[in-house]
Image (cartoon, helix red, strand yellow):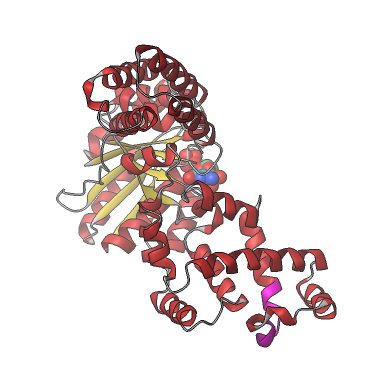
Amino acid sequence: MFDNLSGRLATVVKTLRGHARLTEDNIKDAMREVRMALLEADVALPVVKTFIDHVRQRAIGEEVMGSLTPGQAVIGVVHDELKKLMGEQNDALNLAAVPPAIVLMAGLQGAGKTTTTGKLAKRLKEEQRKKVMVVSCDVYRPAAIEQLKTLAGQIGVEWFASDPSQAPVDIAVAALDYAKRHFFDVLIVDTAGRLAIDEAMMAEIKALHARLNPIETLFVVDAMQGQDAVNTAKAFNETLPLTGVILTKMDGDARGGAALSVRHVTGKPIKFIGVGEKVGGLEPFHPERMASRILGMGDVLSLIEDVQKTVDVEEAQKLAKKMKAGKGFDLEDFKMQIQQMKRMGGMGALMDKLPGQLSQMAQGIEGAGADKAVARIEGIINSMTPEERRKPELLKASRKRRIAAGAGVSVQEVNRLLNQFEQMQKMMKQFSGKGMFKLLKGMRG
Ligand code: GDP
């Protein structure tokens, strides 16, 4: 995500670095580059225009003349304007309604509505201790109803059995009635989508909205659709009083334009982003962090949050202690770190958040198919004896062959893992005694 955009913006900074001060001319060149970068990222044209105007005005203005280098100054302004474009700060879900707070999910088929309904239910249950019920009004696709049932079972929230022979509004009303009587805090209503906008669908979701009067009406849209995503958002926003947008599939190779355009075009905040197919793959959207990520600073803040949430503090402390005592980082620790990464939503989710250098290293470690690679690494380490894990130097050819056979991989793969481990060990040595938290905090500045 945003790789191209980040790369291009980095070039702008580099080009400006050679200049002592900002002039109309070098600003003009820089703005041309920024404009190209945004267009390539599939940002909507009117958004690009407004953005460039704002940046140019501020860049010429006095505020950048201080002690900053021209590159820094422009990047500072671009960062600030990116943040503004996406809405300054996170807009949390509003659940301040007489219970149950109703959340209506709207969007086209395939956008990720049902998946997101499950993800949202999980967040509300686990992070806000809400009693959540979900219901599907998609009477046209029994498979969608089943999909929601399965998700609800997986997450452990209540699923209201829809009767596909009923009208969507009747199903929703029955669910609401049940939720009231059983004191649910939140009712999330999944609705039917179509492949494209059509009147019948719009009429149906409008009727649902009128009858339910939801506190939140969320438009779910696939970020990979780029400008189309923004156009659909616009159409829905004209029909329904949306309260927010959820951009899904931000983990894919979406160029990111939708994230930059949707707020400007609809005036509605992006509340969450979908970052994976699994039920844990939903994150609150933070414009500031996203702006930093786009500019290649890496989303260190949200990484730290994730780490604090998922890292087993006791284990991390043990590791820190061990390193302080001068004992090296061994394969057992390597495995533990890999497991912690897995808990954070897999390598894919993590790599996106790391700042440039570390991210490159992580990619060097994993390459494509990161999560599968992680499973293989674990398999290889599991095939070693505890002694071998503590003293990898014991691993000579015959032991390597045994381990490879045990893990069902080639000896080359065992060698590759050992190389990766050595790199990691070197890095850990550099930070020895500091521990993971400090290491990450150190990256913030
Ligand atoms: P609906 O028709 O809008 O209900 O869409 P679904 O919830 O069935 O999702 C369509 C497809 O998109 C499924 O294969 C989901 O697993 C996938 N999907 C949904 N959200 C995400 C996401 O954030 N990331 C990725 N990679 N896939 C997603």
> Going by the image, does 281 lie left or right of 66?
right
On screen, residue 407 above or below 224: below
- Quadrant hosting residue 130: bottom left
> Going by the image, does 346 lie left or right of 166?
right
> Going by the image, does 332 lie left or right of 159?
right
> Going by the image, does 347 lie left or right of 86?
right
The number of numbered badges drawn on the structure is 0
- Quadrant hosting residue 384: bottom right
Residue 103 location (% of width, % of height):
29, 45
Residue at far front of view: 20
Residue 405 location (% of width, % of height):
82, 74
335, 121: nearer the viewer: 335
On screen, residue 244 above or below 101: above
358, 288: nearer the viewer: 358
Residue 304 location (% of width, % of height):
38, 59
For the point 38% across and 17% down, the residue is 27
Residue 206 location (% of width, % of height):
30, 29
214, 309: nearer the viewer: 309
For the point 49% across and 65% down, the residue is 343
Q: Is residue 410 visible?
A: no
Q: Which residues are magenta?
A: 380-388
Q: Magenta-highlighted stretch: main secondary structure?
A: helix
Q: Is residue 251 visible?
A: yes
Residue at far bottom of view: 387
On screen, residue 425 above or below 31: below
- The stretch drawn in magenta includes residue 81: no
For the point 41% across and 60% down, the residue is 440
218, 175: nearer the viewer: 218
- The stretch drawn in magenta includes residue 387: yes
